[in-house]
Image (cartoon, rainbow, N blue to C red):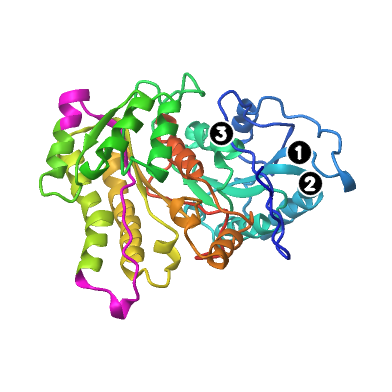
Amino acid sequence: MKLKVKVPGLPEAARLRRYQPGHPLVDGPVLIASAGGRVRDVLSAVIPSPSSPSPAAGEGGSSRWAAILFDGTAMRAIADLGKLHAFTSQTFRNLRPSGRLILFGTPPEDCSEPEASATQRALDGFIRSAGKEARLGSTANLMYVAEGAETVLESTLRFFLSGRSAYVDGQVIRIRPAKPVPTQDWEHPLKDRVAVVTGAARGIGAAIAETLARDGATVVVADVPAQGATLTEVANRLGGTALQVDITADDAPQRIAKHLVDRYGGVDVFVHNAGITRDRSLVNMTPEQWTSVLNVNLQAQIRINKALVEQKVLRDNARVICISSTSGIAGNRGQTNYAASKAGIIGMVQAMAPLMAKRAATINAVAPGFIETAMTKAMPFATREIGRRINSLNQGGLPVDVAETVAWLAQPGSGGVNGQVVRVCGQSILGA
């Protein structure tokens, strides 16, 4: 019998609501409010039944609203922020466990008046602070919706409302106008799409492949030949195919491009997950330790992306998702090579986004924080517990949390999200 051990002095982490096929979008009533904004009609059309709060469940009359949505896209004056405060100060306390607070604003950079820009930027600070005050596994996130982008909001709204976003907290997402691509089946939004995942033999890569397959994609799993047997097992389990390739090899980009064109006629989703660590203090790091990490984690992605674009391997509405890390945002002791590579991924994504947009495609980065894997299990107890606790949700994430975020960005309907970095870290204080 496995005993649950409570660590003295440490709070017990809330159990997060995570998605399972067949689960409803939200597990209770939703409250929608607006300060005369542009997206309320979209919200009302997506939400199954905006309604009255459920009866109190627990002491203090808490646990009522499953989600609270506030449309602040029309706010232009500092005084307008008082409406947000008046609304949330009364409703936030009645958010049920694993509830969602989601704000909607207009990108500050799109505002012509300084006060309007300041008002919209204030939502950023507000939502990050609210996320730190949320309790019992609830999250708080902000979507800046540009004018004209209302028609491509739904996939992002559904992600943040659902259990798919369980470990995504305190994030600010910008949604820009894009060609609307209808989703016929929200249970299988990737149906008829071909997806490639590198580093897919185990861990986060395998979880990403499994989630994409669950959502309807035909999955090509790729990894080094040394992982061939495990890779084949993953491919067989998912009904996909395995591609054994060392992504740092000179001919790797051409091999991958040729395989995808010859076998599938191209690719719809490409996930750059393969990565390595060679941790050591800066003064003791060897040139090989430096070079190997930069080659696998960054240079290989740049070379493969170039081949995908130049050889026209990417189909219309293609999605490229690159796995970065919070280490690339905040840095980490003993990881100058790893952090440099992961920060470089962010630079690559931001530089490629305009090029991808011209092709009706997108490229984004996902930056995991502390994720429970075989590697973290081997950490010293104190180090592991600190990693788990230094975020608003007081726990580590799971590989599926990264996978769900990748799957959202991979959807045809997520074309309004481009050139962005989405942290999957439970709102870690690192880099905040």
For this orientation, the residue located farthest to the front is 1
Q: Amino acid at mark 3?
A: Arg
Could you tell me residue 49's position as x and y percent? 71, 25
Q: Amino acid at mark 1?
A: Trp
At mark 3, the secondary structure is helix
> What separation in Å lies between label 3 and label 1 (alpha carbons)?
17 Å
Question: The magenta stretch spans which residues?
Answer: 259-287
Q: Which residue is mark 2?
A: 91
Q: Are marks 2 and 1 in contact (CB under 8 Å)?
A: yes
Could you tell me residue 369's position as x and y percent? 49, 56
> Which callout, 2 or 1, points at the residue further toward the start of the chain?
1
Closer to the camera: disc 2 or disc 1?
A: 1
In the rendered image, which quarter is residue 37 located in? top right
Could you tell me residue 382's position as x and y percent? 57, 67
Could you tell me residue 11's position as x and y percent? 72, 59
Q: Horizontal placement of 257 versus 341: left or right?
A: left
> Which callout, 3 or 1, points at the residue further toward the start of the chain?
1
| Above-or-below relation of 378 to 154 | below
> Which callout, 3 or 2, points at the residue further toward the start of the chain?
2
Rendered residue at 68%/52% (across/down): 13
Q: Amino acid at mark 2?
A: Thr
Few, some or many residues within 10 Å of mark 3 (<14, 14–19, 20+) = some
Between residue 367 and residue 36, name the one nearer to us.
367
Q: Horizontal placement of 9 versus 23: left or right?
A: right
> What separation in Å lies between label 3 and label 2 (alpha carbons)?
21 Å
